[in-house]
Amino acid sequence: MAAARLMDSEVVSLAKVSAAVWAASFYARLAAANLRPGAPRLAALLPVVALFCGIPFSFSTTTFRGSSAFLLSWLGVFKLLLLAAGRGPLDPSYPLHQFVFSASLPVKLRQFTSAKSKYVDAAADDKSAAGKILVSGAVIPVIIYLYQFKNAMSRYQLLILYAGHIYFSLQLLLAAVHAVIHGVLGMEMEPQVDRPYLASSLQDFWGRRWNLMVPAILRPSVYRPVRARLGVAAGVLAAFLVSGLMHEVMFFYIMWRPPSGEVTAFFLLHGVCTAAEAWWAGHAGWWRPPRAAAVPLTLAFVAGTGFWLFFPAMIKGGLDEMVLRECQGMVAVMEQSGRWLAGATNVTFATR
């Protein structure tokens, strides 16, 4: 019963938050249309920025807090700051519904090179999204089931389980969003992940394969401005530093614990290594490992440093226990709903 009441409360909060996002986006679009880029537009948009930063506090569960923090307090806020500077992806000339969804979700207007490609690309996208939903929907319950044996697992087995949970949860969330907005609003999902297990370098992993919504927003907002003034290496380090700080903020929203600094250290380490990797690659004729060796080396480095710095921050904050309790509560709600539906069905047949 407690789990059911909690889920009911979250649904009510989601409805209120959705209404607030629509109202705030309407105001932001109106302000951007009437003010030139720069300080006046930024000042006008700051109330919306503050709202987006406060929305995760409206929720009680890690799922809703984490999702709203990532989509609104990180991506949404950065999009608003870019809008204040007169840069995309938001544009006040968009129709209101497209502006709202672009501001609050990882979506963009669909671009087609021909009428034929419209239908080919749409069919391929639908098939890909459906496949991701089916795979993630099958794997996540298995991961949740395995959590009950975590006391018998080694530290590394447990961390691998957490990594899988993050990957498939993110894939399920974004594929579900795709299913809702695709083909109805004339919009499409921004790229999500592209086979990160095939990454042959850190540049390849972070820039072209893993959680592509983040580099897509960090390039125009952090990397390019810093690179223009201080060079490529400084731009890379700045982007990874901001990413680390924002991950700390995300963890705070989810776990209500002050940052430990470990996650920022993880991203700074990867920023230094990525910058060094780019510097080495810029020298023609210098030795490079073959792809057959580069892929496992890259994945080993990402996994090893993740086990060292990234995942321990989650465990110390008790995120695994929070997620497990919420998943168990969700299962209880589904079981209760199933019993209610079965009872209602029996009553219906009995009265005939």
Image (spheres, rainbow, N blue to C red):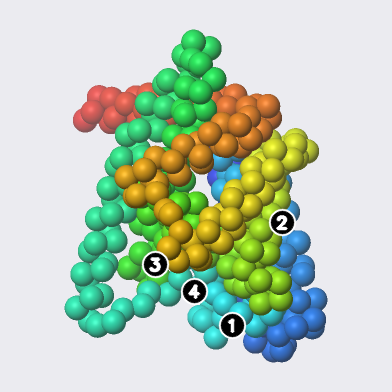
Can residue 77 be seen by looking at this rendering?
Answer: no
In percent of width and height, residue 203 lies at 49, 57
Q: How far apart are marks 4 and 1 (CA)?
A: 10 Å
In percent of width and height, residue 224 lies at 62, 73
Q: Mark 1 or mark 4, which is nearer the start of the sequence?
A: 1
Mark 1 highlights which residue?
92
User: Residue at 35% across / 33% down in the picture?
Assistant: 139
User: Residue at 55% across / 86% down in the picture?
Assistant: 93
Secondary element at image label 3: strand
Establish if 154 lies above or below 301: above
User: Residue at 46% across / 71% down in the picture?
Assistant: 108
Establish if 199 lies above or below 182: above
Q: Mark 1 or mark 2, which is nearer the start of the sequence?
A: 2
Mark 2 highlights which residue?
53
Mark 4 highlights which residue?
98
For mark 4, does the 10 Å Cα neighbourhood hold few (<14), some (14 to 19), or many (20 or more) residues?
some
Q: Mark 3 or mark 1, which is nearer the start of the sequence?
A: 1
Numbered tag placed on residue 188 in the rendering: 3
Q: Mark 2 or mark 4, which is nearer the start of the sequence?
A: 2
Amino acid identity at mark 1: Pro
Can residue 278 be seen by looking at this rendering?
Answer: yes
Secondary element at image label 1: loop
Where, by quadrant of the figure, is residue 248 drawn?
A: top right
In percent of width and height, residue 329 lies at 52, 26
Is disc 1 in contact with disc 3, using a CB cutoff of under 8 Å?
no
Establish if 185 lies above or below 160: below
Secondary element at image label 4: helix
